[in-house]
Image: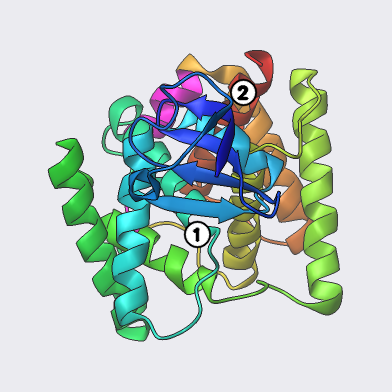
Amino acid sequence: MQVVKKINNNVVVCLDQHGEELVAFGKGLGFPKVPYELVDMSKVSMTFYKLNYQYYQLLKEIPTEIFDLSAAIVDHAQKIIPEFLNPNIIFSLADHINFAITRLTHYQGAQLPFSYDVEQLYPKETAVGYYAVKLINRRLDVELPVSEVTAIAMHFVNSQTVDLATGSEAQNDDDIIKNITKIIEQEFEIIINQTEFTYNRFVMHLRYYIKRMNEHEQISENDNSKLFNTMKKDEPQIYLGAKRIADYVDDQLETHSNNDEIFYLMIYVKRIVNKELNS
């Protein structure tokens, strides 16, 4: 197998014996000068074919040890969840773990609610969530809150689901998301790269936000008021952008978004804006 491009010290782009492109993970694979012939295949821990461009970007942004953690969690999940898991979950889960650690560092105390409903409805996925949080805390020497159990469990629930909505409902959600994207671009005078993983994570958050609002099940079990008020004061433009999004969604769905929902919109909006301004 020929290594043709270095992503980082532990991730490289290769061509297999049939000339097919793949991404290979393995300690030190990126150290030799490329191109070179990789003979010792025992050095390869994971391979991915036909990887989307957005995942290449993610590989550059997220530390390799977090991808290793994600792969270990997915490997454990496959042993106890009988359903087929979308292989892209390794990337979405790695992004979630990285974001959770960032949130822990910059927004201490902010957390999504732990859901006993999810624990009852999806016991296997919740068991994976407990395993994941324990593994992450041990390997990275952090203390993720128990609410991450639910968040990670839902990644595995969603990995077995093709769509959140179908038909006209899905089209309506798509239209709302397109208009939210325009709101951000207008508010911050940026053009969002919609191929970036950061944007796709935001879209996923929006889909669940819309779903929660439609089902009248908002995030409300944790008191993030202090963090909300601090961020509102320190990031007034981010707050106004998130509030404009919430007002638009409420107008479309005839709902009323609470401050917890707006707070998480603020975190995601800030992430997208920073990404575009610093790219």
Viewer-side residue, 53 vs 142: 53
* Amino acid on which the number 1 mark rests in the picture: Ile
Residue for point 49% across, 39% down: 263
Closer to the N terminus: mark 2 or mark 1?
A: 1
Could you tell me the amino acid type at mark 2? Lys
The quarter of the picture where residue 190 lies is top right
Q: Which residues are magenta?
A: 221-233
- Vertical relation: 270 (above or below) 277: below
Up the image or down, 254 lies above or below 118; here it is: above
Identify which residue, 275 or 28, lies in the foreground: 28
Residue 246 seen by the camera: yes
At numbered mark 2, what does the secondary structure look like: helix, strand or loop?
Answer: helix
Q: Circles 2 and 1: CB distance less than 8 Å?
A: no
The residue indicated by pointer 2 is: 275
Quadrant (top left/top right/bottom left/bottom right) for the N terminus: top right
Could you say which quadrant of the image residue 76 lies in? bottom left
Where residue 100 appears, as percent x and y from the top left, is 36, 41
Given residues 190 and 53, the one toward you in this image is 53
Indicate whether 31 appears above or below 79.
Answer: above
Q: Between marks 2 and 1, how big is the CA–CA gap?
A: 22 Å
How has the structure been colored for display? rainbow
Q: Which label belongs to residue 89?
A: 1
**Residue 267 is at least partly visible in this image:** no
* x 83%, y 25%: residue: 186
Q: Residue at x 50, y 18 (%)?
A: 33
Where does residue 54 sit, x and y in percent of width and height? 66, 40
Q: Main structural element of the magenta stretch: helix, strand or loop? A: helix
Q: Nearer the viewer, mark 2 or mark 1?
A: 1
